[in-house]
Image (spheres, grey):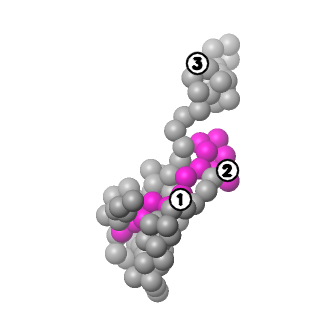
Amino acid sequence: MSKATQITMIQLIKHIGEPMSQTFSIACTQCKKHLWIAQASYMDKFDGHLYGTKEYSKALFHFLMEHKGHPLIFDENCESDIIEFEEIEIEE
């Protein structure tokens, strides 16, 4: 691609709109389970939030208690092995 036809990510977003947000999970690598708990802007991972419903808060507490002492990771879902782990479903 020539320099004349290259566009930056900012220019692309202005043209087509911001891409979907990033999602994050806490996962137990020992049990191969994960819980989706956070979401952030595609452009800025630090512009995000924990998913804050009462059901998710309870699920997070249960997850942490169930996996106490296990190796836990917090990572973006699509950029790690988390995507292959069993997802814990939350009914709202």
Q: Residue 70: in sight, yes or no?
A: no
In the rendered structure, the answer to whether residue 90 lies left or right of residue 45 reads: left
Query: Is residue 57 or residue 19 the one in the foreground?
Result: 57
Report the residue at 39% width, 59% height from top: 92
Q: Residue 14 lies in what quarter of the image?
A: top right
Query: Label 2 vs label 3: CA separation?
Result: 32 Å
Query: Is residue 50 or residue 42 the one in the foreground?
Result: 50
Q: Which residue is mark 2?
A: 47
Q: Residues within 10 Å of mark 3 (few under 14, many from 20)?
A: few
Residue 44 within the magenta-colored segment of the rendering? yes
Q: Is residue 63 above or below residue 13?
A: below
Query: Is residue 53 or residue 16 the one in the foreground?
Result: 53
Q: Residue 27 lies in what quarter of the image?
A: bottom left
Q: Nearer the viewer, mark 3 or mark 1?
A: 1
Residue 38 within the magenta-colored segment of the rendering? yes
Query: Label 1 vs label 2: CA separation?
Result: 13 Å
Report the residue at 55% width, 52% height from top: 39
x, y percent for residue 50 = 57, 60
Tag count: 3
Q: Which residue is mark 3?
A: 1
Q: Is residue 22 above or below residue 56?
A: above
Q: Which residue is mark 1?
A: 51
Query: Is residue 67 or residue 70 the one in the foreground?
Result: 67
